[in-house]
Image: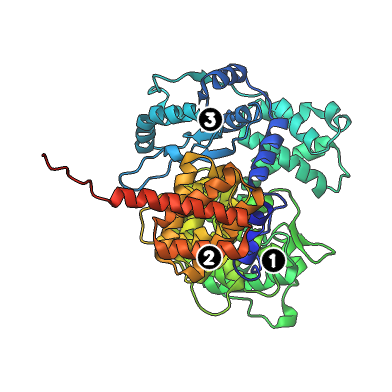
Amino acid sequence: MSDSFRDLYLTVVGATQQSLLKPSAAVPRRVAEDQLIRLQRQFARPDGINAAYDVLAAEHTVLLHGEPGSGRSSAARVLLRELPPSRGMYHELAPDQPKVGTAWLSADLIGEEDRMLLDLSATNAATWNAVHEELSAFRHELLRKGAFLVVVLPHRFEDRPFTDLVHRTIGRPNAWEAVVRHLRLNGLEDAIWQDHRDVLHDHLDTLPPMREVARLTDLILTARSFDHEEGTFADWCEAAIAALTDRDQQVADLLPTLEEGGQRALLLTAAMLDGARGEAVHRATTVLLEKVGSEQDARPLLERSGLSHRLSNVHATMGTDACVRFRELGFAQAARHHFWINLPDVRAPMGEWLGKVLKLRELTETDRERLVVRFTEMCLSSGDTESLASFVIDWTRDGASRTAEVQAAAHLLGKAIESEEFGSRFRRLTREWSANRPTRNLREVLVEVCEKVMSIHHPNAALVRLHHLARNEPQPGMAREALLRFVSQDSRLQRRLLWRLATAQSSHHRADADLFLAFSDLPDDFLLVSATREWLTACWRMAFDLHTPERWAPCARHWLATADAVGDGDLSSAALDILVDASASRYPVLSRIYADARRTVSPALSAHLLRTINRAQTAHFSRLSPHLEVSPS
């Protein structure tokens, strides 16, 4: 990949706007690989996984069975990570409802030597039946490209297997080994926990889902920092187990003692803003009381209880840093869950409250992010995806400065897309929004989420949405900049975008042609492979047809200069052939290209170009000449 293409996006538009989401230190592909490496290091190998690997290595496809909660999806990712290094990328297939007439599993999603995960563990009957019918044909293309696929099967459909593919069942990993690996990976030395392993055994003997085991380990580490490392490993384990098992009941026991609406509002607000400063919690509590219709304290200001005293009544405290936190680990999450599940009528006013609180000056950017993520988690826990989608639309309406709300929409959508259960629905929504004409604010949110979140595990889906957004921009801007930046990271993404530009059947040909001209500096091997060479020719032809010479000529000169730099070889010949073939022997186009070449490139390349033009025109006129009939004598 040439350095000029890597930096090309910097000159497409002006300075980049302030980011809504924090930029990653690495490109999405590297982030995905790092996540797999970390998972592999903390993974406890279950029975059957070695046999599953043997099938995957030999057949390029393996179907995984297993009990729910046994860590099937993690096992699938580890299997793909353990394959020998290849040029392919790791990505996850999402069997989303396709457009009419298109496949659920599109073969063009398969890259050379890719490693792919198809997690069907949460699919419904309709999706299962559709994917079931298409997988054999999909696998045929997969084998042709030397790619690998692991399919996690839904437990409820195990009696309807794929008859022509190999199945393997994996057992449940050793939960204690999983905990130990996780602790070691996070720097907890063996001496700290070796004498206290019995503390966890009773809980692990109940066979909790492996996802809960991972959360338990995180809570142990959180308890350690919560306790400022002053307790023992046994203390941290007891606090972590209590956070998982006892906090819901503690919240249920506390609520009847809070008879006033103000006390309950303070509990809920403190739980939503856990870690924020006290004045922010106080202001947000006042807003919540207004939204739910509760009366505020009518006593004179100096006769009211202080915030610290009121917080102590809801098991919270305000530290020396003036930030509000709960005394018990996991209490804030349990309080949020209790209100959401047991008082469903409070959900609508909480949504209104959220919009107001986001604008409070007392909140930091981190406070807002945490608040939006917590609210998103609560909505997802009850399957309320409609409300979340409505918030994204509402917070991104065109209007006055709405920085806090636009940023909140980005955090909300990014969190929702990562959901295992509902992520596919939000990916569908982003596709719909991107293909239409979103507001400027919504476009900015979609660009950020696609480039920084969706791109990690669903790079092809991110590319498609960024392409739609770039087409629909009133003028080239943030979406095009992000798209070019994204595809510059990997030649396969460039190949896929080039294919879309050359073959898409849409009303956006002019926009696609303009995008191609910004994208025309490509890896050298694209010029020598028949498929990409055809796509390049089609794109140049589209540019000549739909744009004036003032637009395409500078790009053509750059193309010629690049060909000149590589010398007189196969690459330069291919570059000239593509330009000349794309012109379809139109004299004005060829004349402008040749005139520019004589001024900007070497005499040798100019002569080579002239020979190529003459050869093409001779062939063109030969095809047009009628065959002379010879009259019989």
* Front label number (1 vs 2): 2
* Residue 424 shows in this picture: yes
The residue wearing badge 1 is 365
Q: Upstream in the sequence, badge 1 or badge 2?
A: 1
Identify whether 145 is placed above or below 481: above
> Label 1 to label 2, Cα distance in Å?
56 Å
User: Is there a contact, CB below 8 Å, between mark 3 and mark 1?
Assistant: no
SS class of the residue under badge 2? Answer: helix
* Residue 459 shows in this picture: no
SS class of the residue under badge 3? Answer: loop
- How packed mark 3 is, by other alpha carbons closer than 10 Å (few <14, some 14-19, many 20 or more), is many
Q: Upstream in the sequence, badge 3 or badge 1?
A: 3
Q: Residue at x 66, y 30 (%)?
A: 85
Q: Amino acid at mark 1?
A: Glu
List x then y, in percent, for residue 340: 53, 55
Q: Residue at x 45, y 66 (%)?
A: 438
The residue wearing badge 2 is 595
Quadrant where the C terminus is found in the figure? top left
Q: Residue at x 49, y 57 (%)?
A: 467
> Which label was assigned to residue 230?
none
Q: Nearer the viewer, residue 473 or 72?
A: 473
The residue wearing badge 3 is 147
Q: Nearer the viewer, residue 518 or 244?
A: 518
